Amino acid sequence: MNTLPARLRRHLAALRALLVFTVICGVLYPLAVTAVARAPGLRHKADGSRVSADGRGVGSALIGQRFTDVRGNPLGQYFQSRPSAAGDGYDPAASGASNLGPEDVVDSLPDPALARAGEPDPDARQSLLTQICARSKAIGAREGVDGSRPYCTGGGVGAVLSVIGPRDARGAVVRPTRVVSVNEACPATPFLATYRGVRVECRTPGEDVGAGRIIPVRGGAPTRPAVPSDAVTASASGLDPHISPAYARLQAGRVARARGVGVDRVHALIDRHTTRRTLGFMGEPAVNVLQLNTDLDRTAPYRG
């Protein structure tokens, strides 16, 4: 016959449940997961897919990283990764995209007074379009190809106009009275001299161009730019360790010259580190930059 009070019996039942679930969830389950993670074929992934060189860890095959000098300049002897918007770049604690979309085409220009004083302007910001244009121009110069892209100026900013004037019922400007190149700060010479018979002006710092109709100008750049899209845009996670085979091959000549080896040898390494589509149809071929650079250091050491 149970002589314990009902209240005490409830507490004992709760204590037994706590002990049982602590053993199951806090001991047995973690041990089971750990045992599975130690199984052949899974251990490397469970440990973070670490990549080693000369007996030391150099990173993870799952997380991209920079290959730059102390000033942030790309190192010529290494393949470069795609851009990253995760924190200061490839930060797993700040994984994410820039959340800027295709309509983000207007820059917030820096205050010239702060620039003259050598101080950063916290309100200055490049639009997504200008970021892409600037990256493409820089990569084109580095790799010796045409870095031009549609909707980009020759100076590497977004080719965008603010067209001011009377509008029709659909919002289109009927007769322009003033046209401003919104991403080119005075005293710059605008990328277009005139637009619909109106002289194009540079933008005065601090000027609000929102009163005009914002019109991106395509320009004469090729439809298929020489610089691939993954070279100028970040991944959704900001951690993607891969680049496209096209971007890898674009860099092959520079890397081969820097290391003093034949470009065919570098192309062979690119092919070795290119993963194909999953099951033959899912995803796109990709090249793991860290693994490729590590293999380069092992088989074609840089002598500079």
Image: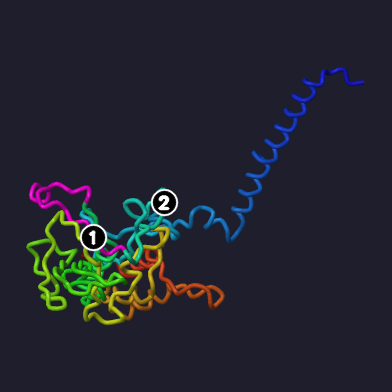
Q: Is residue 100 visible?
A: yes
Q: Is residue 285 left or right of residue 258?
A: right
In magenta segment, residue 121? yes
- Spatial distance from mark 2 to mark 1, Cα to Cα? 37 Å
Secondary structure type for disc 1: loop
The residue shown at (12%, 71%) is 200
Which SS type dominates the magenta stretch? Answer: loop
List x then y, in percent, for residue 231: 32, 69
Secondary structure type for disc 2: helix
Q: Is residue 302 visible?
A: no
Q: Residue furthest front?
A: 169
List x then y, in percent, for residue 239: 40, 58
In magenta segment, residue 172? no
Q: Which residue is mark 1?
A: 210
Q: Which residue is mark 2?
A: 92
Q: Earlier in the sequence, mark 2 or mark 1?
A: 2
Kindly indicate the quadrant of the structure image that contains residue 176.
bottom left
Q: Is residue 122 left or right of residue 59?
A: left
List x then y, in percent, for residue 153: 19, 72
The residue shown at (11%, 67%) is 201
The residue shown at (63%, 49%) is 33
